[in-house]
Image (cartoon, rainbow, N blue to C red):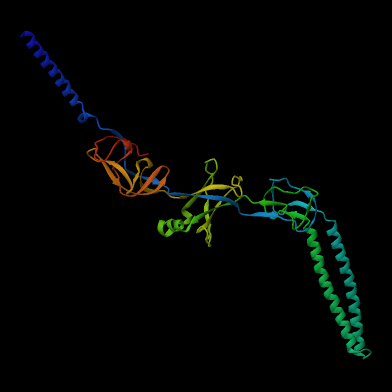
Amino acid sequence: MFSSVSVAIKSLLILWLLFSFGCKDSQQGPGTTPPPSVTVIEVGKSNVKRSVTYNGRVEAVDAVELTARVQGFLLERLKSEGAQVEAGELLFVIEKDSYIAEVERVKGALEKLRGARRLAQIERDRRAKLVKTKAISQEQLDIAEANLIEVNGEITSQKAALRTAELNLSYTDVKAPISGKIGLSPYSVGDFVGPSSKALSTVVSQDPSYVTFPITQRELMTHSSAKTGITPEQIEVRVKMADGSYYQRIGKLDFIDVVADPTTDTLLVRAKFDNPDGVLVHQQLVNVELQEQNPRTEITVPQSAVQFDQQGRYVLLVDDENKVVVQRIEAGATIQGKVVIKNGLQEGQKVITLGVQKVRPGVVVNPNIASAE
């Protein structure tokens, strides 16, 4: 009897202990789990410069191929490849002997014709006197005058031949038509060159330089002054080099082509840059960034805060009760990691930037406010 009572008491004690532990466990269950922590920023306005990037190419303002205008053996190369040259500076010399001889030959022929003209003039004057005394017929005077006219014509023709010969002689000196740097030459001294040969070299101007890039008709209309209120003079053009660095000088839009490329529906746009140090090289590929000169005040949020689903872009807000709320937005450009918000947000609202994956709409959270910067 006593043992039965003892067993019953022990059983009650065990049940009481189990119930007590169960109650404690239930008190520490889901109802008391601390809300998840998220990082939020208070929506505010920032000064932003809108920008858009294109693939571009550097082009020299002037790039001139040096072509031999007369044929002959190359006698001299007076400038090393890559050297700076000035307009009018002598660069190549082609053999001159045959061209000097041609000038002298034509000069001799011209002097001979001048002598013939003198005789023709004397004969014409003599016959003019004889006609007056009727010693000769008018026909003989007409013949003398015609001979004089013919000689004068030959002299005019020979003067033109002399000019041509002198020009050909001058072409044996190949001079720089512009100032710039001289490129590679495929010829060595002693090579035979001529008008049908490859170019002797190329002279490329450096300062200033152009950067050209294609822009679609749609983009041109989107960024037009009528829609944005921004004139070409208010746009800064920056060049991003191959290593990711920016060229130190700011360019300005210089020209928009008047004919579109029919295969791509793009227009060629040109910007002009000062290039005193020759950093920009003719035909170099670069990235071109168009940026507003004056910043605008816009509502922005970090790019990490903007989510996307089938209905479009949205952010998660934390309301006054610390509950998560979905807010649909109309997003604009992304500038340096920040998304411009055109519609959907107001200053002071709290947007979740970190911890988005841990929460869902309606959940209570513990917001930690971070700097909007």
Q: Residue at x 89, y 85 (%)?
A: 141
Query: Which residue is outermost to the top?
Result: 2
Query: Which residue is outermost to the right?
Result: 135
Choose top left, top right, bottom left or bottom right for residue 103: bottom right
Task: From the top left corner, tell me how far across and down residue 240 is, in percent.
Answer: 52, 45
258 left or right of 339 in image: right
Q: Compared to 34, does 5 lie above or below?
A: above
Q: Residue at x 24, y 30 (%)?
A: 34
Q: Compared to 244, does 131 lie above or below?
A: below
| Closest to the observer, 189 or 225 | 189
| Closest to the observer, 196 or 96 | 196
Choose top left, top right, bottom left or bottom right for residue 38: top left
Task: From the top left corner, tell me how far across and down residue 10 is, in percent.
Answer: 11, 13
On-image quarter of the C terminus: top left
Task: From the top left corner, tell me how far across and down residue 63 is, in percent.
Answer: 65, 54
Q: Compared to 326, does 142 lie above or below?
A: below
Q: Residue at x 88, y 66 (%)?
A: 108
Q: Compared to 258, does 200 lie above or below?
A: above
Task: From the top left corner, tell me how far across and down residue 87 is, in percent.
Answer: 69, 53
On-image quarter of the N terminus: top left
Query: Which residue is outermost to the bottom?
Result: 134
Q: How many marks?
A: 0
